[in-house]
Image (cartoon, rainbow, N blue to C red):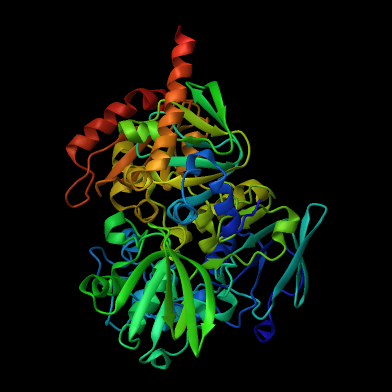
Amino acid sequence: MMMSQEELVDTLAGLSLFSNLSRPQVEQVAHKMTEESYPAGQRILRQGFSGTGFYVIIDGEVAIKIDGEERARLGKGDFFGEMSILLGEPPVADVVTTRQLRVLHLGGPELEEFLRDYPPVMYRMLKTLALRLRNASRWRS
Amino acid sequence: MAELSQRPFPPGEYPVVVVGSGPGGLQASYFLRRLGIDHAVISADPSPGGMFRLFPFFQRLLSWTKPYGPVPRDHRFYEWYDWNSLLSAEAESRALMPEFMDGSSSFPSRPEMESNLAAFADRARVTVRYGCRWEGTRRDGDRFVLSTSDGEYRARVAIFAVGVAEAYKPDTPGFELVPHYVDTRAPNTYAGKRLFIVGKENSGFELATGLLQWAQRMVLASPRPARLSVNSHSLMGVRARYVLPVEDEILGGGVFLLNASISRIERSGAGFMIHCIRSETGSEVAVEADEVIAATGFTCPLLDLPDLGVDVFGRSRLPSMTNYWESATVPGIYFAGTIGQGVSGMKKYGLPANSGAVHGARYNTRTMVYQVARTHFGVELPRPEIDPAALVDALLREATEAPELWNQKSYLARAFTLDPAEGIRDEGIVPLAHFVDEEGTAAVAITVETDDTGDIHPAVYMRQAGRPAVETLLASHPLHDFRGGENRARLAELLRAPTAGAVR
């Protein structure tokens, strides 16, 4: 799947993570993040590895695995990698592509400034993390 | 020698066809021949050199060759100080770049680079059918059929080394009115002009630096702020050679760096009106200029390969590839040279490898050709057995002076398998992302990485049989000699159990 820059900006504007940004801001995001492509079956995040990045899925799907056991799947518009960057710790899970994956990537060291530059993205991310926390609490109770 | 007067590689059936005569095509052909794999090399160009026959526009490269590095030119680690020579096992075709440099800079000029590549083709006897343009591709059973200006080539394996060199301009209204970087005119024709450059990557800053003494005013615009390599701890961002316009901007000297997207470009009198939207505020601003140049990047000229099923992505239309630079969607199609940058690898701390430049691509290409040889032609590459007592030394020596590990940090690694049935075997250079995910036999790999503080240190990846690899970071050293006692002890401890099983 090949997208023009215009189509990429349209796609990003449609993702909930970026939905509160202005069009010029989304264009800037499209230039700040790098588009990457991974074949099926590859790990993007690796349990216990340092120096990982932040990823937003624009096409495809990944499985989240802890010690080889699948826990969840993420698809278009979902993001991953923020937890270990925010905590400064290696990921506690593997993230593995289930099919061809297209992502936007931001280097770990750039995430803090990125979130400060775009408070609406920070708010959206916080909301997602709150949802994950609530769901995790439900499983425990 | 009647064949010398004839063009080599007439159309027909070959085990492998290589397309391109830039650094990638020359390097691929060199290693294919070394492994005894018959192949044809075709190129639309009239002579070797690829993009270096034309670019960079201002005639000096961004990649260093230090004629007097800390190690002699026949030492393998010299390749870390010489980013522009192609790889060769023979003295007469190795480390050729310094021979052609006139001493005025550690960055070779474009003509010097072109001479270096032509000398490599000559002395390494890499033969190319020049003036043969690849025009299209189709499948016929298990063969790829490449139609060219000279006729059809058929092969089981096709290697495309066609660069990322096709001018790209966005489809925003008005871009059709203005030239791309590749159509920049002679510098003196910009004398006294108000110049607007779209793009704040290296090509934009190359033009800005070269035209600084000609243009009366320069505006560089793109949505993201300019990023500098000295801040990114890598080659990512504007290189130090091109930072002068940034300083002029800071000092208010007639250079302006605008974070804005272009909404449209219109003619205005003899010049142009560029309508911009500021990225931070969303406010509109119109800038008048006499000249506009779109330094908006390049794409891969892959012709009809997407119709064959080759998936491409991103602004540069790079192919989606495996970690061995094979099309992820059409097996048997491989990529050499700068296209290899489409394989991200680990990108630790967000730092990309140097696959888009000769000094990274040359190792990728060799690793790819070895893989082609193993998987398509049953070539068994040497896997020397290592004495267990020598493994720690071997690993730390690699981290300290393996040019592959220094040029391709966190991307290529030196691997040793620790199989009880075979002993310890040197597996050579492997893509790190492949090694850490392959659940094969027990193995260890070492690489060099730069972290977010700029610290350069070795990283070790240990794999138990059938399990993914585990990472251990070793200590850095003020002079980058990683062979000290602390690292030796750490590594010996890590290797004790796994190598015990591999001692026969």
For the residue pair B222 and A100, the one nearer the viewer reads as B222
Residue that extends furthest to the right in the rendered view of this protein: B141
Q: Position of residue A40 (x, y in %)?
A: 61, 38
How many numbered marks have been drawn onto this rendered protein structure?
A: 0
Q: Residue at x 45, y 9 (%)?
A: A140
* Relative vertical location of residue A26 with respect to residue B207 in this rendering, above or below: above
Left or right: residue B96 versus residue B240 is right
Q: Nearer the viewer, residue B33 or B332?
A: B332
| Of residues A39 and B333, the one drawn nearer to the viewer in this rendering | A39
Residue at (54% x, 47% y) in the render: A12
Q: Quadrant of residue B14?
A: bottom right
Give the left or right position of residue B341, taking residue B137 as reference: left
Occupied quadrant, residue A51: top left
Relative to B253, does residue B160 appear above or below in the rendering? above
Q: Position of residue B63 (x, y in %)?
A: 36, 69
**Where does the C terminus of chain A fall, quadrant-wise?**
top left
Counting from the top left corner in percent of width and height, residue B30 is at 54, 65
x, y percent for residue B251:
21, 73
- Find the residue positioned furthest to the front: B283
Of B207 and B421, nearer the camera is B207
Residue B294 appearing in the image: no
Horizontally, residue B42 falls left or right of residue B60, namely: right
Residue at 47% over, 80% down: B292
Seen in the image, is B245 located left or right of residue B130? left
Vertical side of B264 occupied by B354: above or below: above
Is B323 located above or below residue B315 in the figure?
above
Q: Is residue A43 visible?
A: yes
